[in-house]
Image (cartoon, rainbow, N blue to C red):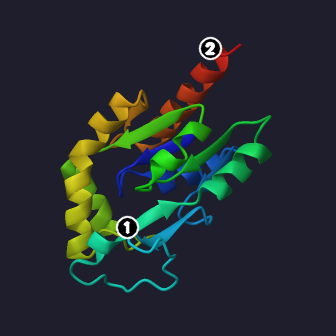
Amino acid sequence: MWVTGNSGAGKSTVCGVLRAHGYVALDADEDGFSGWIDRGKGEVVVDPPYPVPGGWLDRYGWAIVRERVETLVEESRFRIAFLCGSAENEADVRDLFDLIVCLVIDEDTLRHRLAARTTNTFGQHPEELAAALRWNPRMRAIYESRGATIIDASKPVIEVVDSVIDAVQWLTESTR
């Protein structure tokens, strides 16, 4: 199952709670599934600048590595696994998931979470914040059009996690 959403939507927090409850849950950012690439050359950026200079996000993008996701799918063939993250090349891996959940939040919640986050600095620099704010209103429409399960992630985290678990339980019940 792919748990996605805009920066600050709570993907990493949901991942941590799922893990704490005994589920196989991996953070695409922290667990090595994603990284920065030079869009023009396709090369991996080993040491990105921080803060990013103006225009940097126009040339470089956050991408997921299909081969890593394929390995996870193979290793999880007989159990439920959650991969939590977001990447601009997500279309490259979408076919590998039985279910996609998109966490959505309002702009005020997004601003607050990005300003207050301590586990990740993305969104605290003005260029990154602007990018997150541009993408936020688009997320729900994009994922609804793809048939994803939409979850309001501005609710308390335990309610959000319960909704994610309910979505995967619905999937397993409907395929029996």
x and y percentages locating residue 53 in the rendered image: 26, 84
Q: Work out whether 46 lies above or below 14.
A: below
Q: Amino acid at mark 2?
A: Ser
**Viewport quadrant of the N terminus:** top right
x and y percentages locating residue 167 in the rendered image: 53, 27
- Tell me the mark number nearer the camera, choosing from 1 and 2: 2
The answer to whether residue 106 shows anywhere in this view is no
Residue sitting at x 45%, y 72%: 37
Question: Which mark, residue 101?
Answer: none
Residue count near mark 1 (Cα–Cα under 10 Å), binned few <14, some 14–19, many ≥20 = few
Is label 1 in a helix, a strand or a loop? loop
**Which of the marked residues, 1 or 2, is nearer the chain's N terminus?**
1
The part of the image, by quadrant, that contains residue 122 is bottom left
**Viewport quadrant of the C terminus:** top right
User: Position of 75 compared to 43: left or right?
Assistant: right
The part of the image, by quadrant, that contains residue 110 is bottom left
- Which residue in the structure is indicated by mark 2? 174
x and y percentages locating residue 140 in the rendered image: 30, 37
Residue sitting at x 77%, y 37%: 77
Identify which residue, 104 or 39, lies in the foreground: 39
Is label 2 in a helix, a strand or a loop? helix
| Distance between the alpha carbons at the discs numbered 1 and 2 | 37 Å
x and y percentages locating residue 68 in the rendered image: 66, 58
The part of the image, by quadrant, that contains residue 39 is bottom left
Question: Which mark, residue 117?
Answer: 1
Q: Work out whether 139 lies above or below 71.
A: above
Q: Amino acid at mark 1?
A: Arg
Identify which residue, 119 or 147, lies in the foreground: 147
